[in-house]
Amino acid sequence: MNVQIFGTRKSSDTRKAQRFFSERRINVHFVDVAEKSPSRRELLRFTQKLGIDALLDRDSKRFQDLGLAAAHRTDERWTELLMEEPLVLRLPLVREGNRVTAGYAPKTWKEWVASAR
C-alpha cells in the first residue's frame, strides 16, 4: 500500500493523517503544498473523483483573505486557482492508487487498509 498525502506541516488534520498511516506501518509520501503545489494532473485526479467543491476549504483563512466566498468560477478556473493558491485546498488530500479523499477521513482510510490486507 503506497499512500500519498498532500498537506502542510502546520495542519493538524495533515499530521493526524500521517499518524494514522504510520501507526499502521504504511509507507507515506508527504508533499507539503506550502512548498510545492500539486500539479494540474494530480488536482484533476481528485476533482474527477470528488468534484471541485470537495476540494475547496471555504472556511480557510486564505479563502476568506482572497475574497472567494462570492466567487463563481468554472471548474477549470478553480483548478487554476488551486494550483496557484494551494492553501485554499481542503487538507489533507490523500491518495492510494485510484482512491482519494479530501480532508480528515479515518473511516475511509480504515476501509482501504482492511481491503489491502
Image: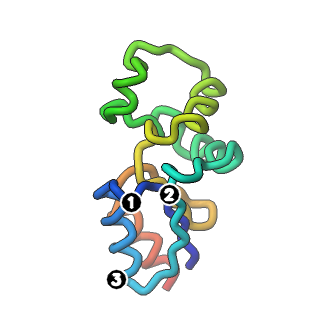
Look at mark 1 in the image and give the residue it sits on. 9
Disc 2 from disc 3: Cα separation: 20 Å
> Image point 51% across, 41% down: which residue?
86
SS of the residue under disc 1? loop
In x, y percent, where is residue 34? 49, 49
- Say what amino acid the circle numbered 3 marks: Glu
> Image point 62% across, 66% down: which residue?
97
Q: Using the rendered view, name the quadrant where residue 10 is placed.
A: bottom left
In x, y percent, where is residue 33? 51, 51
Disc 1 from disc 2: Cα separation: 7 Å
Q: Callout 2: 10 Å neighbours few (<14), some, many (20+)?
A: some
**Of pointers 1 and 2, the one earlier in the residue sequence:** 1
Disc 1 from disc 3: Cα separation: 18 Å
Look at mark 2 in the image and give the residue it sits on. 32
- Say what amino acid the circle numbered 2 marks: Asp
Tell me, what colour scheme is on the image?
rainbow
Look at mark 3 in the image and give the residue it sits on. 23
Image vertical order of residue 33 relative to residue 76, above or below: below
